[in-house]
C-alpha cells in the first residue's frame, strides 16, 4: 500500500482537499485513475467542457491561454479542480511538453462524495481559504 499512501499524500497537498481526512482522501484515490499523456497532447483544451481534475505525477506541461504561454506545470502541480464542482468550460489549454502521467478524477466519480455533508463542508472551507488568499485577505 505504499503507492496508495503516496497518492493520498499528494491529493492532500491540493488546497481543495487539504481539509479532508485520510479516510476521505483514500476514497478519492479509489475513484481516481492514473492516465498517461504523450508529449504534445492537449490534456485539456480552452473553451471546451471541463469534467475533471488532474494532478501531475510525472512530466511537464505548458499552460496556454489564447495560444500564448502562461506558465509551466510539473510534478505536484494540478489543474481542473473547479471543474469537479461546476463543469464549466476550461479557461486554458494544458499541453504535455514531455510524456505526462496524471492522477485524474472525473466529476461523475467525484459527485457522489458530495452527498457526505462532512466532506462537502471541508471542501467549501478549502475553496473559501483559496479565494481569500487570492484576494489578499488575511486569515485569522
Image (cartoon, rainbow, N blue to C red):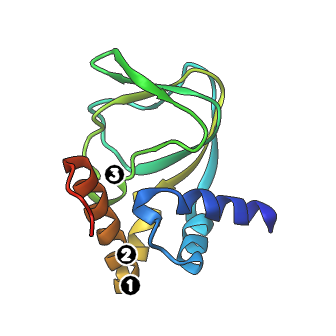
| Residue depicted at x 48% and y 26% | 72
The foreground one among 131 and 112 is 131
Query: Which residue in the structure is indicated by mark 3?
Result: 83
| Residue 129, quarter of the rendered image | bottom left
How many discs mark residues in the rendered view?
3
Q: Are marks 3 and 1 in contact (CB under 8 Å)?
A: no
Which residue is the extreme one toward the top?
68
Q: Position of residue 28 (x, y in %)?
A: 54, 68
Closer to viewer: mark 3 or mark 1: 1
Above/below status of 85 relative to 48: below
Crowd class of label 2 (few under 14; some 14 to 19; many from 20; radius 10 Å): some
Secondary structure of the residue carrying numbered label 3: helix
Above/below status of 76 relative to 70: below
Query: Which residue in the structure is indicated by mark 1?
Result: 118
Q: Are marks 1 and 2 in contact (CB under 8 Å)?
A: yes
| Residue depicted at x 48% and y 56% | 14
- Earlier sequence position, callout 3 versus callout 1: 3
Secondary structure of the residue carrying numbered label 2: helix
Q: Position of residue 41 (x, y in %)?
A: 54, 24
Q: Position of residue 34 (x, y in %)?
A: 64, 49
Query: Which residue in the structure is indicated by mark 2?
Result: 122
Q: Answer left or right for 42 relative to 9.
A: left
Above/below status of 1 relative to 77: below
Task: Report, in whole angstroms, how far the alpha carbon at label 1 lies from the one at label 2.
Answer: 6 Å
| Residue 9, quarter of the rendered image | bottom right
Above/below status of 53 relative to 90: below
Amino acid at each position: 500500500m505504499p503507492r496508495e499512501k503516496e497518492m493520498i499524500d499528494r491529493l492532500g497537498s491540493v488546497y481543495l482537499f487539504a481539509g479532508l481526512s485520510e479516510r476521505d482522501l483514500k476514497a478519492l484515490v479509489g475513484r481516481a485513475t492514473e492516465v498517461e499523456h504523450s508529449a504534445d497532447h492537449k490534456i485539456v483544451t480552452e473553451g471546451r467542457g471541463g469534467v475533471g481534475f488532474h494532478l501531475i505525477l510525472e512530466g511537464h506541461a505548458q499552460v496556454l491561454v489564447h495560444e500564448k504561454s502562461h506558465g509551466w506545470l510539473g510534478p505536484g502541480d494540478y489543474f481542473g479542480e473547479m471543474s469537479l464542482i461546476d463543469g464549466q468550460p476550461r479557461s486554458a489549454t494544458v499541453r504535455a511538453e514531455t510524456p505526462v502521467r496524471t492522477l485524474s478524477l472525473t466529476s461523475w466519480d467525484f459527485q457522489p462524495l458530495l452527498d457526505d455533508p462532512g466532506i462537502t463542508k471541508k471542501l467549501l472551507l478549502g475553496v473559501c481559504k483559496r479565494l481569500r488568499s487570492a484576494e489578499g485577505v488575511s486569515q485569522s
